[in-house]
Amino acid sequence: MLSILGISAFYHDSAACILKDGEIIAAAQEERFTRKKHDASYPHNAIKFVLDYANLKLNEVDKIVFFEKPFLKFERLLETYVAFAPKGFVSFSKAMPLWIKEKLFQKNYLFNKLKEHDKNYKSDENIFFSDHHLSHAASAFYPSPFEEAVVLTADGVGEWATTTVAVGKGNKLDIKKEIHFPHSLGLLFSSFTYFTGFKVNSGEYKLMGLAPYGNPIYVDKIMKLVDIKNDGTFRLDQNYFNYATGLTMTNDKFHHLFGQKPRDPMREKLTQFHMDIAASIQKVTEDIMIKLSRSIRNEYNIKNLCLAGGVALNCVANGKILQEKIFDNIWIQPAAGDAGGSLGAALALWHIDQDNVRKINSNDSMKGSYLGSEFSQDQIEKELNSIGAHFETVDYDSLIDQTSDYLSKEKAVGWFQGRMEFGPRALGGRSILGDPRSDKMQKNLNLKVKYRESFRPFAPSVLREDLSNWFKINVDSPYMLLVSNISDQKKIEMTDEEKKLFGIDKLNIKRSDIPAVTHVDYSARIQTVTKTNNKKYYDLISKFKEKTGCPVIVNTSFNVRGEPIVNTPTDAFNCFMGTELDYLIIGNCILDKTKQNPNLKKDYKKEFELD
């Protein structure tokens, strides 16, 4: 049996995964262990976890692969600094010491780090390096349910490539086309993330969530920044940007064009201007992704599309591609960002380098993305006892019955079951749950539990068989990566007066039978749940439907703003005691907030750096 350890690190979202004979055994992000959001450091804990889960010592691993090539990345940095000189000197002088000390000689650096796991690990001859965009493309194609697919990858930047098109067939995968740095859809979107006062590489999804509150009135101005061809290829005018050489994303020319400086999140509130900017860049992003999709469908005449890279987490754009019916089928890697690069690098090594036959699963090979840590009932009870938690242990049927009862009474519930999810979305393993029928739930969860901006939407988890009765979509969406509208029968039309309201004022209007998961534009980011991909979660939603007639529940990640998703029972208890969650369900244990020792309460608002 051949084992492969995949590693991504040193930019953002470090992660590790392990394959045995091509089967995905385990994968996890380093942030879940260190409790540092988007942790980019060497993934010591994630590697330890995947090795332990696979019951392997490091010296028993056959091959180790890193998700990108550091020398090519260094070449890109040097050439960029030379091309823009002397403008980039400050950025250059800050970057070089780290490159010379660690990144340039990464094989040696990795070898020394890997030795910390196992003193018997003696040779670096089994360390390989993949190409950044090949890693992304492989993470999307190889686990997909397709024999043949065209793969579109879009992100900030890898070594040189920022957007690539690849074609996969059987176990073969070839990159056919590339757009190179500094022309990047990911960096264009991130520039507007920065401009609206959110954190680059973590606030992009906030910008997407803010867009429906605005109108895309700045599209024409954005078109001064980006030249988009009919086939979706594009070039960015670098006169408006600072990311190639500077320490910020945008420059004074950019700010003059839009008439404002970047928002200071500590001093300035979001205004209608920022909502309209968000709507405009979201529209431009969708247009580029749709044009690219159309052109590659026409060129390659392949009916299946796979998506990866950070831009593939823009589930609104994904939903628009689906809506346009450009491809017959779409599959998106749930860990589409750099964390998934660890998995893609390992899969590329197994299939391309080793030429192994690909086994295709009719759903996909990601195992629901439940690839992280899990805890036995015994481990859960021991850990809860050690931290002084008060809990009741019940049987399976009682657990499902009582939890569904709490939800039907509008209680906020922490749900910690089975294996942790790989990727940025909670999918019913480490989730906070609520009643979607409540018109107070969205605001309460945002402000009292998540401690985050009130405009942020929540996702519905819906039984797959009930999907098309509630939403205008009828395809599987197990990874919460597609957005669709609420069905007309469930909509509550706004009055003429309500339609005249601007931006955030629309937040308090009840727009459907499930207002807690209905965004201001009647859209929802959907997760479909089946008995096959998560039986316990499926049973819970089914019991909730039995009691309420509603086959949908609110699902948001189990964390607060700025905190990674919880990993251990202790993480879950800390979050429970630091927020206004009413109940915590871990394994077969039920924890009632009113029965906990008040001395264990946490001041959680200040625990994590805001994202």
Image (cartoon, rainbow, N blue to C red):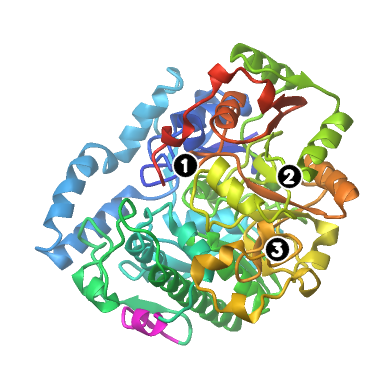
Badge count: 3
The Cα–Cα distance between marks 1 and 2, rounded to whole angstroms, is 47 Å
The Cα–Cα distance between marks 1 and 3, rounded to whole angstroms, is 25 Å
Three-letter amino acid code at the position of disc 2: Glu
Q: In this view, does 124 lie above or below 367?
A: above
Say if residue 425 shows up in the picture. Answer: no
Three-letter amino acid code at the position of disc 1: Val
Q: What stretch is highlighted in magenta?
A: 218-229
Task: Label 1: state its secondary structure.
Answer: strand
Between disc 1 and disc 3, whose residue precedes? 1
User: Residue 103: percent from the left, percent from the top?
Assistant: 28, 42
The residue that disc 2 covers is 410
Name the residue: 62% across, 24% down. 55
Say which of 46 and 537 sits in front.
537
The Cα–Cα distance between marks 3 and 2, rounded to whole angstroms, is 45 Å
User: What is the number of the mark on residue 65?
Assistant: 1
The residue that disc 3 covers is 147
Between disc 1 and disc 2, whose residue precedes? 1
| Residue 219 is one of the magenta-drawn residues | yes
Between disc 3 and disc 2, whose residue precedes? 3
Say which of 7 and 387 sits in front.
387
User: What is the number of the mark on residue 584?
Assistant: none
In which quadrant of the rendered view does residue 258 lie? bottom left
Task: Label 3: state its secondary structure.
Answer: loop
Name the residue: 40% across, 62% down. 270
User: Residue 232: percent from the left, percent from the top?
Assistant: 47, 80
| Residue 35 is one of the magenta-drawn residues | no
